[in-house]
Amino acid sequence: MSNVLVLGHKNPDTDSICSAISYAYLKNEMGMLAEPVRLGEVNNETLFALNTFKFDEPRLVTQVAKEATQVILVDHNERQQSADDIGDVQVIEVVDHHRIANFETMDPLYFRAEPVGCTTTIILKLFKENNVEVPSNIAGLMLSAIISDSLLFKSPTCTEQDVKAAAELAEIAGVDAQSYGLDLLKAGADLSNKTLEDLISLDSKEFEAGDHRFEVAQVNAIDVEEVMVRQKELEVLMTNAILTKKLNLFMFVVTDILNNNSVAIVLGKRADIIESAFKSSVIDHRVLLPGVVSRKKQIVPVITEALS
Amino acid sequence: MSNVLVLGHKNPDTDSICSAISYAYLKNEMGMLAEPVRLGEVNNETLFALNTFKFDEPRLVTQVAKEATQVILVDHNERQQSADDIGDVQVIEVVDHHRIANFETMDPLYFRAEPVGCTTTIILKLFKENNVEVPSNIAGLMLSAIISDSLLFKSPTCTEQDVKAAAELAEIAGVDAQSYGLDLLKAGADLSNKTLEDLISLDSKEFEAGDHRFEVAQVNAIDVEEVMVRQKELEVLMTNAILTKKLNLFMFVVTDILNNNSVAIVLGKRADIIESAFKSSVIDHRVLLPGVVSRKKQIVPVITEALS
């Protein structure tokens, strides 16, 4: 019998990687043979978390059906964000905190989605519901995911439950959430070893709204202008992506993690919706987004609504 | 501010009605203004449960958007099984035990599906997770739902969790699960006041598989032949439904609740798949299904697979 693979979304972020590792740990404790895997490269922030709590990167798996007949999805449910061959395996569980779309099964399954800021906040509940103790290094990873998804509790996606879970996990992990959190975010905002291709692809997600396909890439930065001086070069890569993936809109968002604002480059046939949707002028394909830090809560619903 | 409506599926069965009442009770205890409603007529079995535990029928609501902006779905998630105008309101929660399909939201929500035999088995967990006590009359309804969905624990959909939940609920309700359960099922199998139209519509559900639409109606009976002697008349009504609803297949299943077998009438363009799908001869549109009692586990996946 092959292992059940536990996987987060493409272009994995810290929540996707840490949820896969911690949920696979829980399932193993509950008697299932489960292995965490990843669908893409690990980013600097996640690497910092893995190094701090002494974990190896999960194994890279691009074709899940070659390896397993059953999988568990964490931190995503939409087909286009999952393994390309996800339709060839049985999804037996989903633990997620996103909207639900483009997801369908033949059989009943365990599907646990909650409108909280981070998947590991839900996974902490599942540890408790199943009376399994969270080991200190796993708690460190779970805490890292909450800090990452909530931008150290400042994102509007962050709920009281996330704050409470993070406090509990920091205690178990034996770290100070604020100082560790700032180090973690800074590691993620270190763009020095990133190519321009990395910037527009590493944390990028595709969405569908009606007949429209759009993609939103996001990078965190300490110095936003360091990225934006290369706007013209970025636009060339974005235009390529639009053609290759048949996108109607590509939005590249640079988020200032110290001041909690964003600036974005928008391209594509339907870039015309941005100005009125976000109530902010688009000048030279660039738009300022004051107070916007959350793709999930402040960007994707706005674009989806405008395109629908 | 209008109440949040809590609703089960069309052609409500005992689980849909009892889940709506008990989950609305829980949400009210947790501080939400929630009202259980129903999308259709209450069947004899459900009426028996409501009478036994002294509940009124929930209010009939056919257009949810006229009444509320937010709803909670219990015991279903597929759009075509819900209110016709479900797309005009926000679904803020789902508690269900079916496969997931034709469901999509703009925003994250609370979605709790588990592969157990009955929705109220999950709702019992939610009472506990939220530290709310189950009152004895609510426990009676929740027990009724489990007995109904599991055919008194004999259906292959019944899990250990359902049996355990039922034992706990019977204790709280102060009834004997076996003797109350048999009375409940017998009340549901009393077809004496049912028209033929009732038989093919009261517990009937539509499904989609690829480009195909199919419907499966099910009635429980003590004496299967009492229903089957009227096969020719039933076929006329089924043919009408096929034309009106543009179905590729209509399966009418009569389940012998004492012996746990079923017999079905199958009509429609794609009735050709039935013989090989169920490995049983179709003679005069009639097929014997030994050991088959569960639409969800033993019928719908088999048809879906054959049509895909």
Image: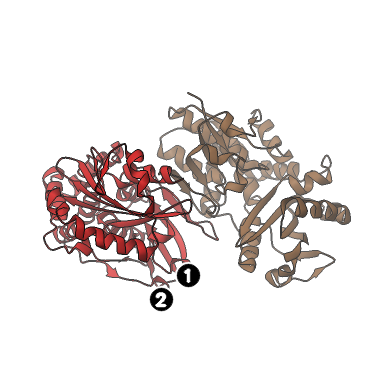
Chain colours: A red, B brown
Q: What's the residue at 41%, 43% (across, down)?
A: A306
Residue B74 can be seen in this image: yes
Q: What's the residue at 43%, 39% (across, down)?
A: B128
Residue B178 vertical placement versus B225 (above, below): above
For label 2, the residue is A66
Asked whether B172 or B148 is in front, the reply is B148
Q: Position of residue A97 (x, y in %)?
A: 37, 48
Residue under mark 1: which chain is it in?
Answer: A
Q: Is residue B37 left or right of residue B29?
A: right
Q: Is residue A178 left or right of residue A271?
A: left
For label 1, the residue is A88
Asked whether A245 or B98 is in front, the reply is A245
Residue under mark 2: which chain is it in?
Answer: A
Callouts 1 and 2 close, C-beta under 8 Å: no
Q: Amino acid at mark 2?
A: Lys
The first of marks 1 and 2 along the sequence is: 2
Q: Position of residue A55 (x, y in %)?
A: 19, 63
Residue A4, image quadrant = bottom left
Q: Is residue B21 left or right of residue A171?
A: right
